[in-house]
Image (cartoon, grey):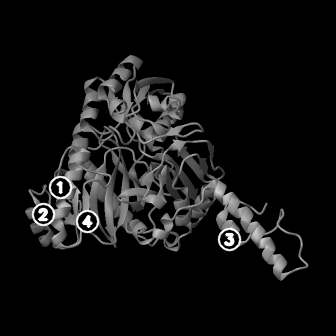
Amino acid sequence: MLESVLVANRGEIALRVIRACRELGIRSVAVYSDADRSAPHVLAADEAYRIGPAPAGESYLRVEGLLEVARRSGAEGVHPGYGFLAERASFADAVVDAGLKFVGPRGWTIQAMGNKTDARHRMMEAGVPVVPGTATPLADAHEAVERAREIGFPVLLKAAAGGGGKGMRVVQAEEEVERAFEGAVREASQAFGDGAVYVEKFLTRPRHVEIQLLGDEHGNIVHLGERECSIQRRHQKLIEEAPSPAMDPELREAMGTAAVQAAQAVDYVGAGTVEFLLDGRDFFFLEMNTRIQVEHPVTELVTGIDLVKWQLRVAGGEALDFAQEDIAFRGHAIECRITSEDPARGFLPATGRIRDVTLPAGPGVRWDGGIVPGLEVGLHYDPLLGKLIAYGPDRAAAIETMRRALDELRIEGVVTCIPFHRRTMEDSDFRAGTFSIQYLEQRPNLLEGELSQEARKAAAVAGALLENERREAFHPRVKEGFRTGTPLSQWQRTAWPWTNGS
């Protein structure tokens, strides 16, 4: 087992790793920028070191600075979390070259699966089904047109080195290809320093389903079932759950087997995820994420396996102490990503100082967050504030627990996406589990704005007065007015949902 680990990240994932280290008896070392001097992950770690000013390029992305902290602190390993340097092969190699353990896969594995066209080619050789398309980057817009004709419209142009929806364009007709190709190349170059783009068939109503993997240095690789990730916008996930409502045991076994084949093809070590597009009962390889995922808690809840602890154990040389047949799936878990974004404005990032936080609690509720009152939310980092996870014996119960938890969760001082999640939990298609990755595009009502807390209180008071006037007008003898115990009108409940009648 490693004795000390530097957590090369921030926010809720850094705090998550630090907590796992504490429970395993591992000394944790945090790093922080000037913007995060008083952040929860800094206070929770055994040691903490400043690595630079707020911009990520001058702090969390400075490999030399991180390795210097590892040397000064005596850390034996480095956990990259997710985002930042987590999927940069050169960082993994630099950590190993410095005589440290990288808590994740080998550098060459990250490199092999990081380039989308190379990964597609490897998966085809391994017998893993892939979406029809090119296995090499397109030379120019003319070749893009030719290949799109062969595949058949609609098609998807994708950055070979990309992720997160950047360098990606859906093309419905031939006359759109050239402009879309140029846009994808330009965006890919800016985001990844690599303008290579390939084309694949665009599936019109697939689901996004991923398989969680765990491997050790002794050649053992298992899958821990699937996660449903179809609720997303601009290819960024918003809500995830396990298991998928579209899955049955036979399909799970088939997808799990394909995911393990994919991992074996690159000698995978650590926690990773193979993402698939599910079209009916046909599934196709999309990409592999060579790191822990944001949505890992839902898998932990339905399997009882702590993925972060196993990342640390595997990095310390331990072998998995369970086999595929030992993994059981129980209950249902749903995760809502709570971000400082405004759904009514196209999920534009919001800034501000967090004034107060009220966290939900009770049976079946888990909060993985990295915020406290007084924390300044800026534009330097990802807008993820935390993850709200609900667990129940079945999907219906998990949804009800999530509804209750969302009503209890309050973050004051910055706009968040909580109202969007509340509406989604009420949506009939979501509750029925009948949705695809186009879900959000077809429901603009879920993105409508919501009144501020002050406006909601004022609206509730106004609604109460109107209700009283209405009752007196139609029932002159009723003079009780609005008081404790008076049932709220539907309008008032909508304006002030956390009110319980008082």
Q: Quadrant of residue 87?
A: top left
Mark 2 and 1 residues: CB-CB less than 8 Å, in contact? Answer: yes
Q: Amino acid at mark 2?
A: Ala
Q: Decide which of tag 3 and tag 2 comes sooner along the chain.
A: 2
Q: Quadrant of residue 130?
A: bottom left
Q: Which residue is mark 3?
A: 491
Disc 2 crowd rating (10 Å Cα; few below 14, some 14-19, many 20+) is many
Mark 3 and 4 residues: CB-CB less than 8 Å, in contact? Answer: no
* 322 sits to left or right of 301: left
* 187 sits to left or right of 227: left
Q: Amino acid at mark 4?
A: Val
Looking at the rendered structure, the secondary structure element under dot 4 is: strand
Q: Amino acid at mark 3?
A: Trp
**Mark 3–mark 4 distance (CA, rounded to whole Å):** 41 Å
Q: Which residue is mark 1?
A: 197
Percent of width and height locating residue 94 = 26, 29
